[in-house]
Image (tube, rainbow, N blue to C red):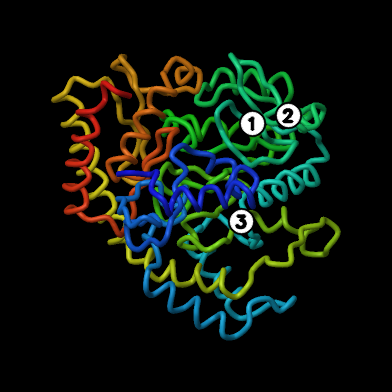
């Protein structure tokens, strides 16, 4: 693939003049800076006409693939009815009921536009419910870019994650290693009376695709219950992807509150905070503020309803499991054949690839600090040059639109990229 042709270059220059960094999100500050023309199913095309098999899927939301026809149809119909009413509407009610029906532990929810804002709402609710100040979170877990939650873990130290971030905004935050029962027990023993909430990805998908150790989530659940701490699952990535009921269903764990987004609405911007009814009591009266002009709009909730129409037929999950497993097998076969020290870890619907000479799976964030992320980033650039659109940080997403034929083609392109790895 040639990412430097005239149309792309012209549009990059225009983007750099009009958009800060040429993008609208820092996660898109990539090289090559791809300018996309369109996407359909499991593929996208840049403005030079180059086609890519896509395993980034918009950073995960397009679990049904791009522009799934039945979802598009329902969204267009909703749009014709008007988008924002500043009032409750029938699609909003039905979407809430349908989401709660697949989350049997949850009793009520609120819709929002992004998971970052819903994490903020969850922490506010937890502080109100407990009368406590602190939030316990984990190295390597991402919960949005707001001052009070964005961190950079540096050799076990916690630093602010951005220039301009108020340093004292992290004062009420306790950060420890995830998947370490002893570390969690010690933190709760020391700080338990000050902890309002524990917030975590129930499967660490933002970094490493690390599954919870057997019994770990239940250990956290039990201690939170004993100490009156609100347990918040950030299911932004895992929700509706690793199972219809998310990681809570797949791993048999029950939070008090959980945040959903991405796959819930098949790529349309929508998020939800679900949880226990008693925790929403002050939200319901208006005493605890949660607001947003675009929350629960008609097109977002239509997308949720149409997505659930697809996902409730669990054959979608069986298909993604089959295709994702075949993809992992195919990529692993190429790597083994060429003796390339890239390890693949995770689930068929979402996994990470990393350069790693060790033979043991990664179970904690600290282990990720030893891998050569820059080397994988260079390799990801080569994959893009060979027509495979992937994330530089190593995560691969598989959608319902991917097929076994796509896997065969991906493996061919992957083999070509691996053959060029000496230049990475």
From mark 1 to mark 3, how far is it between C-alphas?
A: 19 Å
**Residue 165 position in % (x across, y down):** 76, 32
Helix, strand or loop status at disc 2: strand
Query: Which image quadrant is residue 92 in?
Result: bottom right
Residue at the far left in the pictured view:
337
Q: Badges 1 and 2: C-beta atoms under 8 Å apart?
A: yes
Residue in the picture at 65% in, 45% down: 20
In front here: 229 or 399? 399
Is 296 located above or below residue 383 in the figure? below
Farthest residue, direction bottom: 81
- From the viewer's perspective, is 59 left or right of 123? left
Give whichever of discs 1 and 2 has the lower sequence position. 1
Tell me the residue at 43%/39% (across/down): 32
Measuring from the top left, give residue 386's x and y in whole percent. Answer: 27, 41
Q: Which residue is mark 2?
A: 173
User: Which element type, helix, strand or loop, lies under badge 3?
Assistant: strand
Q: Is residue 66 visible?
A: yes
In this view, the mark in front (1 or 3):
1
């Amino acid at each position: 693939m040639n990412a430097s042709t005239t149309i792309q270059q012209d549009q990059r220059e225009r983007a750099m003049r009009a958009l800060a960094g040429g993008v609208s999100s820092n996660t898109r500050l990539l090289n090559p800076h791809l300018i996309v023309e369109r996407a359909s199913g499991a593929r996208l095309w840049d403005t030079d006409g180059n086609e890519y098999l896509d395993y980034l899927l918009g950073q995960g939301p397009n679990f049904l693939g791009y522009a799934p026809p039945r979802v598009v149809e329902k969204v267009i119909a909703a749009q014709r009815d008007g988008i924002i009413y500043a009032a409750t509407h029938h699609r909003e009610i039905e979407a809430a009921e349908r989401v709660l029906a697949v989350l049997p532990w949850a009793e009520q929810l609120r819709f929002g536009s992004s998971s970052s804002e819903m994490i903020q709402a969850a922490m506010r609710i937890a502080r109100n419910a407990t009368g406590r100040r602190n939030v316990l979170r984990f190295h390597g877990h991402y919960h949005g870019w707001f001052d009070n939650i964005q961190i950079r873990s540096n050799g076990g130290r916690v630093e602010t994650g951005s220039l301009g971030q108020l340093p004292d905004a992290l004062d009420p935050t306790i950060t420890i290693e995830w998947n370490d029962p002893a570390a969690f027990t010690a933190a709760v023993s020391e700080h338990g009376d000050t902890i309002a909430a524990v917030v975590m990805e129930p499967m660490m998908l933002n970094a490493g695709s690390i599954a919870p150790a057997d019994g770990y989530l239940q250990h956290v659940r039990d201690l939170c219950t004993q100490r009156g701490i609100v347990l918040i699952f950030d299911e932004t990535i895992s929700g509706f992807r690793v199972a219809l009921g998310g990681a809570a269903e797949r791993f048999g764990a029950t939070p008090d509150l959980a945040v959903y987004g991405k796959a819930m609405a098949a790529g349309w911007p929508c998020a939800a905070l679900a949880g226990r009814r008693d925790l929403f009591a002050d939200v319901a009266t208006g005493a605890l503020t949660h607001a947003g002009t675009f929350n629960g709009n008609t097109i977002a909730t239509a997308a949720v309803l149409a997505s659930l129409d697809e996902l409730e037929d669990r054959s979608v999950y069986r298909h993604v499991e089959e295709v994702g497993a075949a993809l992992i097998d195919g990529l692993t076969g190429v790597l083994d054949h060429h003796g390339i020290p890239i390890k693949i870890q995770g689930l068929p619907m979402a996994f990470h690839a990393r350069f790693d000479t060790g033979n043991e799976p990664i179970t904690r964030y600290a282990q990720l600090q030893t891998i050569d992320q820059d080397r994988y980033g260079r390799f990801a650039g080569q994959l893009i040059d060979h027509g495979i659109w992937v994330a530089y940080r190593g995560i691969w997403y598989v959608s319902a639109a991917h097929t076994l034929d796509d896997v065969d083609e991906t493996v061919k392109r992957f083999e070509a990229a691996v053959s060029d790895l000496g230049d990475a």
